[in-house]
Structure formats: C-alpha cells, structure tokens
Image: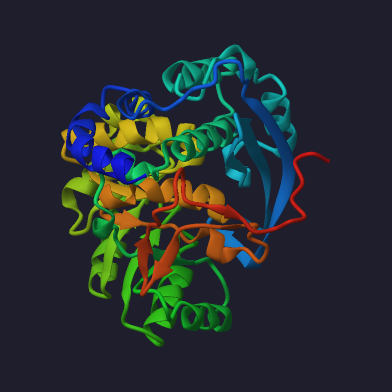
Amino acid sequence: MPTNRRNFLKAAGALTAAAAVLNPAEIFAKTFGTKINKSKKMQLSFIPYTAQLRHVFRISHNARTSTPIVLTRITYDGYTGYGEASMPPYLGESQASVLAYLKRVDLGQFSSPFEMEDIISYLDGITTHNTAAKASVDIALHDLAGKIIGQPWWKIWGFDASKCPNTSYTIGLAEENVVKQKTEEAAPYKVIKVKLGMGEKTDKMMINTIRSVTDKVICVDINQGWKDKHYALDMINWLKERNVNMIEQPMPVDMVDETAWLTENSPLPIIADESCQRLDDILKLKGVFSGINIKLMKCTGLFEARKMVTLAETLHMMLMVGCMTETSCAVSAAAQIAPRVQWADLDGNLLIANDCFSGMKIVNGKVTLTDKPGIGITKTDKNINFEA
C-alpha cells in the first residue's frame, strides 16, 4: 500500500493531463501493475427502488412525493461496484424502461472493467436514449474500477478536493408557511436554491419569504418557466438586488435567440440545465448561456461528464454539477467532479427519507469528498438484496 501511494502521487500530475483524452483507469491499471484475472467475468444485477421524498417537491410544471429509481451492481473478481438510475418524470424514463434496457446489457463480452472506453461506447449504442439507464451502469463501472485501483475518482483525475464549492439546498415551490419551514431546515447550508417560474406573484413571494428568514446567497432555477425575455430580465434585476447570484434555465429550450439576448444583458450568469443534456450540446450553447449544469442522469454518467468538464473549461464556460432526487450513490458519483465547478447542487440525497447508501458529506455547507475508493460509498441498507 505505501508503495502504491507513492507511485500514485508521482503519477498524478501526468495523469491529469492525460485524463481528457485517455482512459485513466486503463493507465492506472498499467502504472500500478493491477492484477487482472481475465478468467473472471463482470456480472451486472439490478433492482427497482423508490426514493420517498421528505416533502412534496414542486417545480414549474409538476409535483411529486417520490422518485422511481433502479439500483445496479457490477461484481468482478471479488470486487463490487454500485450504480443508480433516477427517473424524475421529465426525463421520460421509468423503472420499466430502465429494467428493459439493463436486461439487454451483456458485460460478459469484456475481459475487465478497464476496457472502459469500449464498454461505454457499447452501452451508448444499445439504444438512442435511456441516459439514466446508461448512467446506472457507468456509475457502477467507475465504482468497481476505482475500488480495484484503490483510489477515488477525484484523485484518479488529479482533482483537488479542497476546491469543492458549497452545495445549495433546494426549496421547491410551496405555500408561504412551508417555504419558511424549509428555509429553517436549510440552516446548515450556506446557499439556498429556489425553484421559480410560476408567475411574478408566486416567484416574488418565494424570495421575499426566504428573505424574511435568512440573508444567505440564493441560486434560482426557473425550469423554463419564463416565456418573455423582457420580463425575465426585469425579474433578474429584481433578484440581483436580493442577493441572488445565478439563474438556471430561465426560458424554454427552443427559445435560443431570446436566451442569448438575456445572457448578454443579464447582470447574473445564466446556466443551461434542460438545454444541456450531453457533450454534443455544449458547442451549440457557447454564447447562449454563461455555463452549463452537468447531471449524470442526463449525460450517461461519469465518463462523459469528465469530457464535458474539459470542453466547457476550454470554451471558458462556467460549470455547475447537479443531481436529481437520488440516493448517496449517484450523488457521490457526481461529487467526483465537484472540485472543478463553480456551483454544486448536490442535495438530492438530503431530500429523501430512505437513503440506502452513505457517501460524500456536506460539512459546514461544503461538498466534502472522502478517500474511499471508487465513488466513495458504502451500502447501508441490509435489506437491499440484489440476489432476490
């Protein structure tokens, strides 16, 4: 172990430069002489799960009390990696569609998890969409490979964990008394994320109610709820005066020219969420948004998320990492790229009452990564049985 750690520190600098174009897991396997038992085969298993929300979660176009999830597991040569697909309604996926996709996945054709680039390409080619389903395998694959290497992915990529930002704590659209209650619950967090987009009266009520409780920094997520660019700019100017520091997806995806005008005139950065799904979207968004929000459930997982970070940084676009309502499995996976972003919205596990994993922590409001290998998680619910 001491020798491996010294080798790791020596190689980390070179790996950081290589990570954008090469498969770092494969490089590590070669660098440290990881013993690969090619007679072993990867085994994928999966089970449906339902995340129960602590409160009704409302955004500008829907409300829900739970989120359907599928948990995945890949075993190989005595190692186990875990993954997750979370399917809020707007993604267009369901437990049934994810399970149908996963039944088509055959990892036995690959000799080891370090054939990561080929595996990810294979997963993406099975269907055109199913991004959350693909992410569930990608996350488990990264967890598995990181455990074999013996390092967390933020270290494999050469990131500095001390540079992780504070996470925001999300307050969905609600009545005034509920908003006050949620704001008080957000006391341990330094940034509050507020869902808006239901009209001027409701939007201003949300902000004014929060401001009656706290003066903490606020990020707002409109979820495409504003349809007029002049109204949107007026609201942004009003929000700036109330210590709001970022606007996420203010206008519908198809209002590209209006959003570009808004970004050019806005005193606050405008971040793409629904407009940015995958790597191929980023070039089209340069000049339309100030930056992008990366979510594993949209981009098919960590392999592509890492590439999105590199491209956005090359284009001098700002970065945010977000999540759905997820367990600590997927949230901890997303947290691996947190050292490279300006904003983090990694509270999905905090919004559910039945988290079945333990992983990255929020300490004094800040995303705090662990040294545990892979994505840094431990399964805590003994009732989760992949063998059933």
Write down the quadrant of residue 52 in the picture.
bottom right
Taking the view exactly as shown, the residue that stands out farthest to the bottom is: 212
Q: Is residue 65 visible?
A: no
Please state if 168 lies on the left or on the right of 258 as rendered. right
Placement of the N terminus among the 4 image quadrants? top left
Q: Is residue 88 above or below residue 124?
A: below
Q: Position of residue 335 (x, y in %)?
A: 40, 51
Q: Residue at x 58, y 43 (%)?
A: 90
Q: Is residue 201 above or below residue 370?
A: below
* 144 or 309, nearer to the observer: 144
Q: Is residue 387 above or below residue 203?
A: above
Write down the quadrant of residue 43 in the picture.
top right
Q: Position of residue 362 (x, y in %)?
A: 42, 67
Q: Position of residue 226 (x, y in %)?
A: 41, 53
The chosen color scheme is rainbow
* 297 or 333, nearer to the observer: 333
Please state if 158 lies on the left or on the right of 142 as rendered. left
Q: Residue at x 55, y 15 (%)?
A: 110
Q: Residue at x 63, y 16 (%)?
A: 108
Please state if 221 lies on the left or on the right of 324 as rendered. left
Q: Position of residue 243 (x, y in %)?
A: 26, 73
Taking the view exactly as shown, the residue that stands out farthest to the right is: 388
Q: Is residue 170 visible?
A: yes
Q: Is residue 240 above or below residue 160?
A: below
Placement of the C terminus among the 4 image quadrants? top right
